[in-house]
Image (cartoon, helix red, strand yellow):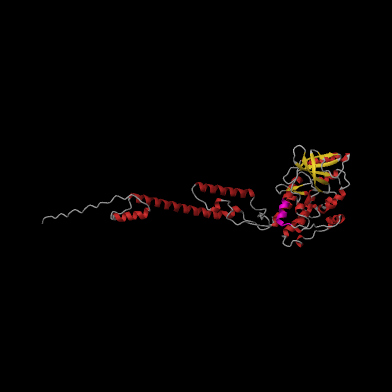
Amino acid sequence: MADYTGRQFGHYRLLRLLGQGGFADVYLGEHIHLGSFAAIKILYARLVDEYRERFINEARTLAHLSHPHIIRLLDFGIEDEIPFLIMEYAPHGTLRQRHPPKTKLPLSTVVDYMNQIADGLQYAHEHKLIHRDLKPSNILIGPRNNLLLSDFGVALIAQAAYSQSVENSLVGTVAYVAPEQLKGKPQLASDQYSLGIIAYEWLCGTRPFQGTLLEMWAQHQSTVPAPLRQYVADLPPEAEQVVLTALAKDPGQRFASVREFAAALEAASGVEKVAVAPAQSMPLSEQAQIAQNDRIKLKAMHKEGHTPLPADITDPDAAEPHVTSNTTNEGPSIPQPGASIAPARRGRNKMIGVATIVAVVLLLLTSTLVYAIKGGGLMSSSTPPQQQASNENKIVGKEMPSPTPTHHAAPLPRRISAA
C-alpha cells in the first residue's frame, strides 16, 4: 500500500501513519495554517465518476452528526481520485489497543462501556443512520477517557466508492456482523447484534464465532452462542440472558433499541441497583410531589424555631434503607417512599413539639429564679446575713454586690401597769 506521509490532503499535511483498517489507512495530520491536529483517513477506494456524488452525499450526512460519544467529521474531499475523511483526533488510541484479544473485563467495566457506546448509537439511530462496522478497533478513547464511535458509516462510504478491497476487508469484520447484514439487509438492530458480540467477547475473552469467513458466515446464521457462564461462572444469569437476547438471529427478538439493551444489562448486573416499581405503582410525578411537600414542611418548622432531627434536614429517604431489586416489571410491589416515611415523620413532629414546650418552661423558670435572686425577693427575713452571702455565691457562681443588710428592730419593753 502507498505511503502518503508528507503529502497534503485538504489543508492538512500528513505527519505519520497511525494505523490501518479494513477500508482505510489513518494518518496524523497537521493543519498548514492553524497548526492543529486531526486524523486523516485515506480510503483504499478509487472513485469513478458514478460513485463520486454518492460518496459526497454520504460524507455530508456524517458531517452533521454531533454527539459526545461520536467522533466528529471535520472535513472530507477527493485528491487525485483518492477519497479522504478528516476526523477529530483521539490521542489515546482504540479499545482494541487498550484491551487486546482474549482480555476479560469486569462486568462493571463492560456495563460502563455499553452505556457510552449505546448512547452514541441511539443518537445515530434516531437520525436513521446505521454504523454497519461496529467493533473494538472502531471505538476510540477521547482525551477524558470517554469513548468515541469512529468509522460511522465508513463501510457504506467505502462501498459507495468502488473498491476491490471491500470483499477482503470483511475478513476482519465479519466476526461482528449481524446475520441480516451479511445477507445485504442491514437495519438498526444490526448494530445491537454487533454490540452484543463485543459485550460477549469482553466478558469471557473470546468471540462466540470463530473460523474462516464462510464458517463464521454460517455460524452467524444458525449457530447458538455457547453460554457465557461456561466461561465466567460468577456471571449473573440475568446478565447472560441480556447478552444472548441481543444476539438473537431474528432482529425482532432483540431489544427494541440499543438503549434498552444497555439499560437491561446494567439492571441485570447489579452494578447500580435501582428499585423497579410495578406498573400499578404511584407515578413518579406524585412521588416527586410528596417529597416536595415534605421539604416545604421542614422549612416551615425551621422558621418557627423547631429544630428537626438530622434525618429530616437532608433527603427524606436518608434514614430509610435502600430498596434494591434486580427484577423487571414483574414481581412484588415495592413500598413508595412517601408512604413509608410518613408515620415516622409524624411521630418525630410530636416529639419535637413536646420537647420544645418543656424547653420553654425550663427557660422561664430559670429566668424567674435569676431575677428573684438579683432582687433579693426569695430571701427569708429570718436568714442571717452570713448565710445569705454564702447562698448567693453558690447560686450565682460569680462575684455579686452584697445585699443590703436587714436591720431587726429591738423589742419594745413590756409596759407594766399598776395594780
Q: Nearer the viewer, residue 352 or 117?
A: 117
Q: Is residue 300 magenta?
A: no
Q: Is residue 112 magenta?
A: yes
Does residue 109 appear left or right of residue 79 in this picture? left
Residue at 83%, 55% in the rendered image: 220
* Residue 406 x/y as whole percent: 27, 51
Q: Which residues are magenta?
A: 105-115
Does residue 330 appear left or right of residue 382 in this picture? right
Split into 4 quadrants, where in the image is the C terminus? bottom left
* Residue that lies at the very extreme toward the top in this rendered image: 33
Does residue 3 appear left or right of residue 99 in this picture? right
Q: Nearer the viewer, residue 52 or 140?
A: 140
The tally of labels here is: 0
Residue at 82%, 54% in the rendered image: 175
Q: Answer above or below: position of 45 versus 387.
A: above
* Residue 6 x/y as whole percent: 82, 42
* Residue 198 x/y as whole percent: 77, 54
* Residue 235 x/y as whole percent: 72, 60
Please identify the dominant SS of the magenta region: helix
